[in-house]
Image (cartoon, grey):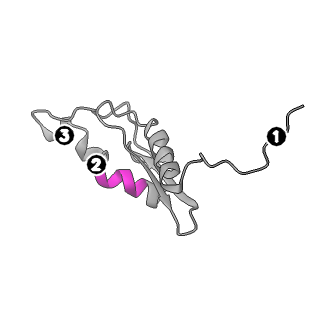
Amino acid sequence: MSEVSCKKRDDYLEWPEYFMAVAFLSAQRSKDPNSQVGACIVNTENKIVGIGYNGMPNGCSDDLLPWRRTAEHKLDTKYPYGRTFCHRFCSVAWPG
């Protein structure tokens, strides 16, 4: 029987790579056909305090509003309805 190594692994993810992987994974929840953005907010103790991705605000149906980036009328695009840069990160910082 071979002896199992008793030393710790040295090929584990560092904190920045770990948090980026969490953000990447959360971005996969986005239904936006053009951009998938994830966010992971961490405190000074390397604890995750929020995770989010770009999508509609809570309570808004993503089936009823447009997904287009450009259109003749701005209201026919996704931007007036909360899929903006700000919402991606506000939904993480202030969930619910």
Say what amino acid the circle numbered 3 marks: Leu
Name the side, left or right, on which 8 lies relative to 58.
right
Packing grade of label 2 (10 A; few <14, some 14-19, many >=20) is some
Q: Nearer the viewer, residue 5 or 21?
A: 5
In the rendered image, is residue 69 in sight? yes
Marks 3 and 1 close (CB-CB < 8 Å): no
Q: Main secondary structure of the magenta part?
A: helix
Upstream in the sequence, badge 2 or badge 3? 3
Question: The residue under label 2 is which amino acid type?
Answer: Thr
CA distance separating discs 2 and 3:
14 Å
- Residue 88 is situated, as x and y percent measured from the top left of the image, at 37, 50
Quarter of the image with the N terminus is top right
Mark 2 vs mark 1: which is more N-terminal?
1
Give the residue furthest to the right.
Answer: 1
Q: Which residue is mark 3?
A: 75
The stretch drawn in magenta includes residue 35: no
Picture layout, residue 83 above or below residue 28: below
Task: List the single residue furthest toward the left.
Answer: 72
Q: Residue at x 24, y 44 (%)?
A: 79
Mark earlier in primary sequence (3, 1): 1
As measured in the structure, the alpha-carbon distance from the residue carrying label 3 to the one carrying label 1 is 63 Å
Residue mark closest to the camera, 2 vs 3: 2
Using residue 84 as the reference point, say whether residue 18 is left or right of it.
Answer: right
User: Would you name the residue on which mark 1 appears?
Assistant: 4
Examine the rendered structure and indicate whether residue 37 appears above or below residue 70.
below
The mark closer to the camera, 3 or 1, is: 1
* Residue bearing mark 2: 84
- Depth order, front residue of 65/40: 40
The label on residue 63 is none
Tell me the residue at 47%/59% (across/down).
Answer: 41
